[in-house]
Amino acid sequence: MTDLVVRRLLVDMEAPVARHWCAGDAFRSALFNALSMSFPFGEQFFIDSVRNGFKELSPEQQERFRAEVQGFVGQEATHRRLHALYNGHLEKLGLRNDWEPRARNRLKLLEGQDVRHWLGITAANEHFTAIFADYLLHNADLLGEQDARLATLWLWHSSEESEHKTVAFDLYQALGGGEEWRLKWMRRTTLFFLTDALRQTITNLRCDGTLWKWSTWKSGAQFLFGKRGLITLTYRPWRDYFRADFHPNQQDSSAAVRWLTEHRDQFVPVGA
């Protein structure tokens, strides 16, 4: 079990967000903005999944998971709030969030389903966020220096995602979730996540007026498939999820621990 600390990030989310805040790069800014657009609704889904899964545990199991579930919920609720503020600035820039309505419509298909399905989807999404988080923590310079506040937001968020990456997975297993559905939900989540992320990024670029610029897609190809590319470096850890003996703790979290230790002046533990 991991001690999950809920932290209040010391950043000013009232200041406006520049159109190309991420290293002055249109593609990277559009992609990070797309991911932020998915978080308020997505993280509420994760919170609901974990809370409802916790309720299904035996009293003995609840005692084992109680502190970790509370920490998970607190961290995700804080992420949700800050990204909602961030997304408010994106609306002012004229960006349209099409990802959330699609996710809401898909959620209707899960109403009344066994909570293990909710947890299986959450565990798969948490694996995506954990491997993306580790990538970002190892390549923080790609965020640029134009907006130190947003760089801090993304790296803090990444560190906490790495911290709590086991919670939904462990609950799924504690409730008897099977391997077949764990892998099915990862395959489906991969399809939905990548499709939604690409569609929202394209929408953001279209709203931004940079969709048809050669420089946009040259930069995008380099960011995704270059030597330090996002897909290049996360493919192997993504594939690890399909191993029969996989557990999220098998993947290194030292970058998150290091960032939280070295930047403790950027946040205040809630309740401290």
Image (cartoon, rainbow, N blue to C red):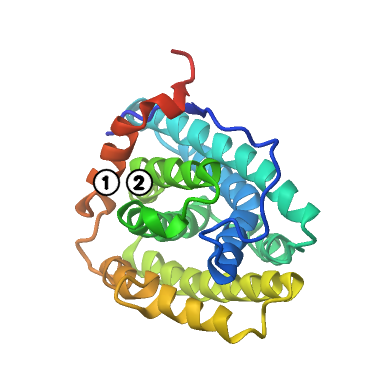
Count of numbered badges drawn on the protein: 2
Disc number placed over residue 162 in the picture, else none: 2
228 vs 89: above or below = below
- State the image coordinates of residue 269 (x, y, percent, origin top left): 44, 21
**Which is more foreground, mark 1 or mark 2?**
1
Residue type highlighted by circle 2: Ser
Along the line of sight, which residue is nearer the eye, 76 or 87? 87
Give the image location of residue 207, x and y in percent. 76, 71
* Secondary structure category for the residue under label 1: helix
In which quadrant will I find the N terminus?
Answer: top left
- Identify the residue position indicated by label 1 in the image: 255
The image quadrant that residue 130 belongs to is bottom left
Q: Is 136 rendered above or below residue 67?
A: below
Q: Which mark is residue 42?
A: none
Frontmost residue, 1 versus 52 = 1
Q: Is residue 59 visible?
A: no
* Side (left or right) of 46 relative to 93: left
How would you rate the neighbour count of disc 2 (Cα within 10 Å): few for under 14, some for 14-19, many for 20 or more?
A: many
Residue plotted at (39% across, 50% down):
172
State if disc 2 and disc 1 touch (CB < 8 Å). yes
Q: Amino acid at mark 1?
A: Ala
The kind of secondary structure element at disc 2 is helix
Left or right position of 145 against 130: right
In the depicted view, which residue is nearer to us: 218 or 58? 218
Residue located at (45% from left, 36% from top): 72
The reply to whether residue 70 is visible in this rendering is: yes
* Residue 36 position in % (x across, y down): 60, 54
The residue at 49%/19% (across/down) is 270
